[in-house]
Image (spheres, grey):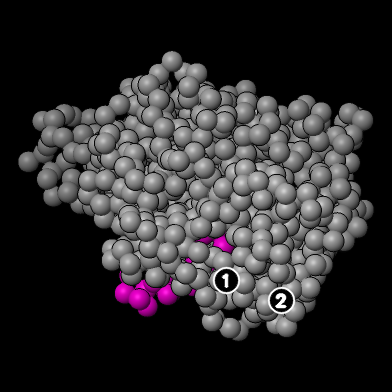
Amino acid sequence: MLKTVEIAVQGIVQGVGFRPFVYGLATQMGLTGWVNNSTSGATVVITGNAEAIASFQQRLRTELPPPGHIDTVTVTDIGEEQFEGFQIRPSNHGEKTTTILPDLAPCPACLAELWNPGDRRYRYPFINCTHCGPRYSIIEALPYDRPNTTMARFIMCPDCQREYDDPGDRRFHAQPNACPRCGPRLTYGDREGNCLAHGDEALSLAVTQLNQGKILAIKGVGGFQLCCDATRFEVVQTLRQRKHRPDKPLAVMVPHCDLIQQDCELTEPEVTLLNSRATPIVLLRQKKSVTLAPNIAPQNRDIGVMLPSTPLHHLLLTALGKPMVATSGNVSGEPICIDNQDAFNRLNPIADGFLGHDRPIVCAVDDSVVRVVQDTPLFLRRSRGYAPLPIPLPKPTPKPLLAVGGYFKNTVAIAKQNQAYLSQHIGNLDTPLSYQAFQTTIRHLSQLYDFEPEEVICDGHPDYLSHHYAMQQNLPVNTVPHHYAHILAVMADQHISPPVLGIAWDGTGYGLDGTSWGGEFLRLTEHHWQRVAHFRPLPLIGNQQAIKDPRRIAVALLWETLGDHWPESLECPFQDLNLPALKQLWQRQTAPLTTSAGRLFDGVSALLSLVTTVSFEGQGAIALEAQVMEAETVVPYPCDLLVKEDHTVIDWRPMIAAIAREIARVSTATIASRFHHTLIQIMVKIAQQQGLERVVLGGGCFQNRYLLNQGITRLKEAGFTPIWPTQIPPNDGGLCLGQLLAHLYPREYRASPRL
C-alpha cells in the first residue's frame, strides 16, 4: 500500500549537495516526490510503500556524504499523492533557522580538476562544487540560493549552467559555480594603484614577487592575508616592522604535510586537523632544527601552521614550493580587509603588491586557530571553517536573544529556539574600525536569520564597547559576570549542567566587587552559584602600564612578599625602572587590585627576564610555557590556602619567596615548570576542598597547553572529572555562548550572593 510522507530535515543540508543526493537516492529506490530547500533546512516529500519509506529515511542519515550533517528529522504522514518521478523544486520561504555552512577548502575532486590540463577549469583559482568552496563569506540572505550570494553578479556560461541544472552533476545547484569564462578572476596591482596583470599572469607575477622577498596582500576567501617568504629572516623582519608586530607569532602556510614534518612534530590528531575541510591554523611543536626563519615565533616552541585553504592558495604554494607567512591582512588592532580598495588604502604601507579578485566578500572571516590537547581540538580562535555553525542550548530560549561578548577576542551570538549561532572571530574592540566590524557582524547575522532581539546580554564591565552597544539598543539588558560566563560557556560547549566547580583563570575580568578578577573558583549548584576561592589580590602599579610593563607586576610581587629584602640577583630586570617612585605608589595602597592568574604569569615571566615589555596579550605566559618544555621537575612551590568564613584565599607569597631564592642558582626552565605545577596543585587542592566531581576549566589561561594538559591529568588522578571546551575557545571568544546560557537559569541564579 502506497503512502506519502513529508520529511522536514534540519542540519547542514544547504550548499552541500543534499538535494542531488536525495534526488539520486529516491530515483535509485523508485520513489516519487520532490525535495527543496527551506529557510529551516530542507523538505522531502516521497510516495512509496512503508518499507521503502523506512529504508529511505535510514539511508538518508547513513549515506549523506560530508560535510552534510543531519540534526533532526521530522516525518509527517500526509496521505497519498501521485507524482511524476522525482523533482527538485525551488526553495520556499518561512522562518530562517537553517544551518549555514562555513567556508570550506577545496575537495579532492575539485583539486583533481585544478591540476588536470585537460579540464576546462585547469588552474582556475575559484574552482568549487557542492562539497566545497565559499559559503558564509558570500551569503547575503537565506535560503542559500545564488541570487542571495555575491555570485549573483556572475552570469553562468552555458557549460556552467548545464552543470548547475543537472541533478546528476556534482555542481548541481552549487551556488558559487563558475569557470574561467564566466566567473571571478584575479588581478595583480602595485602599491601605486597600477593593475599589472590578470588571471594566470597575475598569479605568476605574485609568485615571482614572493620569491624576490616582497610582501603581498592576497585576497583569500574571508579577507586579505599578508604573505611573504617564511624562510628568510630579513623578509619576515620587514613584515614585522611594517605591520608594527614586533613579537607576536606569525602563521605559516605550507604546500603539503611532508614539508611540515621537516620543521614540526606531528601527531595523528594534528594531521587530521590540518587536512580537515576547515583547514585551520594548527599550533605545532617546533623541532630543534628548522628551515623557517627564527623570527616567525620568537620565544615560542609552537608554530601556527596551515595547509592551503582555497584553490588560489594551492596554486600559489605549489609554484612557490616553500612555506610562506600568511597572517591577517590588517594593521595591528584593526579588522582584516575584505574590499579591494579598502585593502589598497589600509595595507599600502605594508604590502609591496596586491593579488586580488572581483568576487565580493560579505563579512570578514579570519583564519581559525586550534591546538591539540589530550588528542582533542582546543580552539584559540573559532572563525573560518567553523563559524557560524550553531551550538545547541539545553532548552529553547524564551525570547530571541543577542549576546555581545566582551572586549578581547570578541564574538557575538544570537539565540533562536534552542540554537546558539556564534559569529566568527571579530577581535579586540579597541579601535573605531573593530567596533564597526562588530556592528556589521551583528547586522549580518540578524539579516540572515530575520532576527530581531528582544533582549541583549553583555559583560558587566561598564567600559567595554560591547557593554555600551547593549545599553544603546532600547531593549532590556542583562549583564552576566565575566568569569561566570566563562564557566557557563564550557558547560554549554560540553552539554553539562550543575553541580560543578568552575575554575576561571584569565588576564582580566570585571568582578562583582568592582575590582579586576581572574583567578577564580566558582561553585555552581542546582539553585545558585558563588565564588568560593581566589588568588590573593595583587596591586597593579600604574594599572594599564603594569600590564604593558610586567616588571611593575614583578616588583609588586616582591614588595608584597619580601618588603625591601630582595636578593641582589633580582636587580637585572629592573635596572632602568624608577623603583623609588614605584615604591611610593605601592605604599600608598591606591593601585587597583587584581586576583588574576594571568597577571601572575606576567609577573613571574618578568622576574625571570623572559618578557619585560609586552607587545601582545599573553606574551609572558607563552614565554613561560615554552620554558617548561626544557624542564623535568614537577615539584611545586609552597602556596598557602587561607580559609576565610565563606571562601579561600590562595596566598602566592610563599611561591614568590621561593622563586626569588632560586633565580640565581637554578635554571629558568626549572622555575617555570615548578610555577606551572604550583598552579596545578592549587587546582587539585581547591577541588578536594569543594568535593564536586566535575571540574570545569575556562578562561584564557587554559590556552596554555601544558597547564591544561597537566591540569586535566592531575585532576583525573585525584578522582575528578575535568571538563574543558572543544567547540569554542576557553578565552573571551566563548563569552557570548556563556552569556546566552545564563539567560536559561532563573533570574535569582544569575548573580552570586557572595564575593
**Does 618 appear in magenta?**
no
Q: Nearer the viewer, residue 693 or 315?
A: 693
- Percent position (x, y) of residue 580? 79, 53
User: Quarter of the image containing the N terminus?
Assistant: top left
The quadrant in which residue 754 appears is top left
Q: Which residues lie in the magenta part?
A: 702-720
Residue tagged 1: 655
- Percent position (x, y) of residue 369? 59, 53
Mark on residue 663? 2
Q: Is residue 611 above or below residue 38?
A: below
The amino acid type of the residue labelled 1 equals Met
Residue in view at x 37 percent, y 78 percent: 717
Q: Secondary structure under badge 1?
A: helix
Query: Within 10 Å of the Cα at label 2, are there few (<14), some (14-19), or many (20+) other Cα atoms?
Result: some
Q: Nearer the viewer, residue 282 or 76?
A: 282
**Does 718 appear in magenta?**
yes
